[in-house]
Image (cartoon, grey):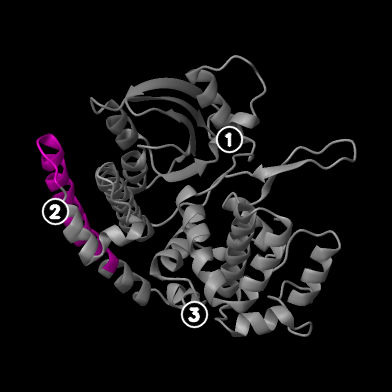
Amino acid sequence: MLIVGCDFHPSWQQIAVFDSDTGEGNEYKLSNGDGAAEQFYRKLPAPARIGLEACGNSQWFVQLLQELGHEVWIGDAAQIRASYVRQQKTDKRDAMHILKLLLENRFPRLWTPTAEIRNQRQLLVHRHKLVRLRAQVKNQLQHLAMNQGVQKKARLWSQAGQKLLRELPLAGWAASRRANLLELMKLMDRQIAELDRALEQAAEENPQARLLRTQPGVGPVTALAFVLTLGDVSRFPRGKQVASYLGLIPREHSSGGRQRLGAISKQGNRFLRQTLVEAAHSVVRLDEGFRKQYQHRCHRKPKGVAKVAAARKLAVRLYWMLRTNIGYPEIVHIESSPMVPLVDHGQTETLNGRSRLQQTGAKDGPAGLGKP
């Protein structure tokens, strides 16, 4: 079997090839733009195992390899780099290092989503980008209004506020700018409304998303984004791994028996982390249990810290809803009951028991009540 370590770049790639049958090895530099890379992989006997780092602009390459029948392994770029101790970094060394990890069975392979999941992710990302662009347009309109002494804030987008905005005495390019921005906002409102309907339909057709929407405050965007980002939840043994995967755990630099914790790591899916923090606002209003814990934290911590802690608790609860296939409010009753067992892994645990362990030192539990 041929094993290939690939250091991929958008315009070219450096590869190291090893034949496990003959023990021969070769190195190649292939150009992507002129078709040399595609010709090489089409001639490569299938199936070959090809490993490369997770990077952008490589989807076409991965799809090509899968269509040709090759086995594609996507690796964690940070872990691959951390396992390389030498100070000399070149493309040839990177390709050889990836090949070495593959041969030694130390390659940090990542879970890869299916084509259907990637397609639905594009729906979420497209809507997210349009919402951000619309926010920028609204900010510019607010600036024009405030320069004329009008401070309506959110009321500027009501019918009365819109009428007042159009009647502002602007002249020259300021009036032209207002007209163009209002036209852009109208266009984006229409496009976002279409995407919202598509998201609602996709969330309704997904049974896991429907399950998560039983949690008060969780809408179609949060539910679908959580399902599509986590994928197979069984790959996470505990809720702590989910919080770490989303970058909702604190940085830590502990040594010599002294623990030093910082702000959250933010290592993970930025879009889902932001979505969970936004959803936590609604969940705190609608879920009494969340509201009590949020208000309790606000007495001891800044509100920003309390919001992030609520987002982590929400992420862990949604994870356990998917893991146990139990919706709201039954999942709350399980969290508060010491007699209901967790998912069976050969030993009996309880949600409430893990919460008590967490309070005495452990930092994880299905209720997500770790140190914020």
Residue at x 47%, y 39% (from the top left corner) = 54
- In this rendering, the answer to whether 211 lies above or below 257 is below
- Frontmost of labels 3 and 1 is 3
Q: Earlier in the sequence, mark 2 or mark 1?
A: 1
Q: Answer left or right for 26 relative to 129.
A: right
Q: Position of residue 196 (x, y in %)?
A: 29, 66
4 vs 346, nearest the viewer: 346
Determine whether, in the image, residue 294 is placed left or right of residue 130. Answer: right
Instruction: Give the secondary structure at mark 3.
Output: loop
**Where 371 falls versus 137 (above or below)?**
below
Structural distance between the alpha carbons of marks 3 and 2 = 44 Å
Q: Which residue is mark 2?
A: 167
Q: Is residue 297 magenta?
A: no
Highlighted magenta segment, given as a residue range: 169-196
218, 186: nearer the viewer: 186
Is 171 in the magenta? yes
Q: Amino acid at mark 1?
A: Ala
Read off the residue under disc 3. Answer: 214
Q: Is residue 136 visible?
A: yes
| Residue topped by disc 1 | 78
The picture places residue 241, in percent across and down from the top left corner, at 65, 56
Q: Quadrant of residue 330?
A: bottom right
Q: Earlier in the sequence, mark 3 or mark 2?
A: 2
